[in-house]
Amino acid sequence: MLNWIWLGLIVLAVALGALTGQLDAVTNAAFTACKTAVMDLALPLAGIMAFWLGMMRIAEKAGLVAILAKALRPIMRRLFPEVPTNHPAMGSMVMNMAANMLGLSNAATPLGLRAMQDLEKLNTRPGTATNAMCTFLAINTSSIQLIPATTVALLAAAGSKEPTAIIGTSFIATICSTAVAIIVVKFFEKLPMFAIPPVMPPVNKVALPGEKDDTDLEALPDPASSLQGWAQALLAVMGCLFFGVFVLMAFFPEYFQGLVNHIRSMLSFPANYTPGEAWFSKPWYERSIATISLLAIPLIVIVFPLYAAGRRVPVYEEFVEGAKEGFQVAIRIIPYLVAILVAVGMFRAAGGIDLLSRPLALLLTPFGLPSELLPMIFMRPLSGSGTTALFAELIKQYGPDSLIARMGGTIMGSTETTFYVLAVYFGSVAIRRTRHAVAAGLTADFAGVIAAVVVCNIVFR
């Protein structure tokens, strides 16, 4: 399906460009997209990938991924019955989903790419997406998001009186899109048009006497039993410290501000720390989620190496070994990024988004969907930056507290750039036949839009 969609975007872009006299803009958009794919996306991603794959390597060697996979085994077993419950892919997918929920995009993408690499190890037909891959990407493109940070920031910057008003509506809409994604992807995988011929499962390697299988979580020793005493004590201290910071920031922000400024004065630093007026005006549950998002990365960066060192894992060497994969993955996805971004850029420059929006405006407006949102809705599966630009224009034109702005923000918080995600994730493992992943992702986006329209019309009208 992705082949036909890509071809259709290219052909329509050139045809529309010729009819409207926009061929120059279409050509320029193609070259600009090439530069963006390599210079703005792939190369910066290489460094981020190196860092997170290094941290994942440490977590694997320390047994943390195994612990996480075991804890969520009942849920993951139902979602991914094709993946052995003791496989590292389970832990990688869980960490990616958690990062997506917290809005940690810089961590979610590398962890998702690592999960795809782990799933590819189980693939008996290289080049063809497995059911587990399609399910993972369907959940990924519709992942429940606790706080749509980018959207809230845009509304706040525009002077909204209640920029966080869309958090609740986005949460409800994204739950709907995720539920639809799971149902649809499981239904599609059973259809003959998406089926793949059955093959014999791969022969598992039989461990020799005294040899430990690194992929078997049951064979790993109990991590707590081999954790050295100094590491247990230090981890306990760090846990109490982070918990204390969380409680103070979420429930007693004024006291936390005073405490931090007092400590800064004792250390001869300027006592000018302030979280901002918007932080104090938030309800406690919003501050709690925002605090978790703020502390998640520092906590991971400290706990993973510290826990591994307590289990006598050579953290520096393992980090370097894992980081080596980061640059290779970033280089591998460049052709796929160029392909999808060039097609999207050309189609947008030719006016294809506006052309799709016009005939549907009269049809959808009576159902409570403002026609002004249609260009943004069509742009959403194609380009994140393009959607953000269109949303910013809507805020400027209609106001940050208007129904259109809040509905658009809810749509952004409950949908994803489906084609970009599929191109990057499948490209990282050289998947050419995507099967039902595109259909499931677009269906989930559609469900997110419908849910956003219904919820916003109920809440904000």
Image (cartoon, rainbow, N blue to C red):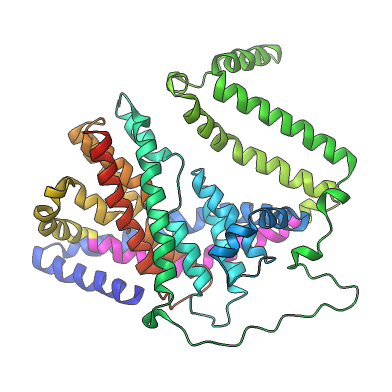
Q: Quadrant of the C terminus?
A: top left
Q: Nearer the viewer, residue 332 or 177?
A: 177
Q: Residue at x 84, y 40 (%)?
A: 231
Check if residue 319 falls in the magenta segment: yes
The quarter of the picture where residue 260 lies is top right
The quarter of the picture where residue 120 lies is bottom right
Q: Nearer the viewer, residue 305 or 135?
A: 135
Q: Above or below — where is 55 with respect to 149? A: below
Residues drawn in magenta: 318-347
Q: Above or below — where is 332 with respect to 106? A: below
Q: Does the rendering let one see residue 47? A: no
Horizontal and vertical percent position of residue 308: 79, 49
Horizontal and vertical percent position of residue 51: 63, 52
Whether residue 153 sits left or right of residue 349 in the image: it is right
Q: Quadrant of the N terminus?
A: bottom left
Check if residue 425 falls in the magenta segment: no
Marker count (numbered): 0
Q: Residue at x 20, y 51 (%)?
A: 374
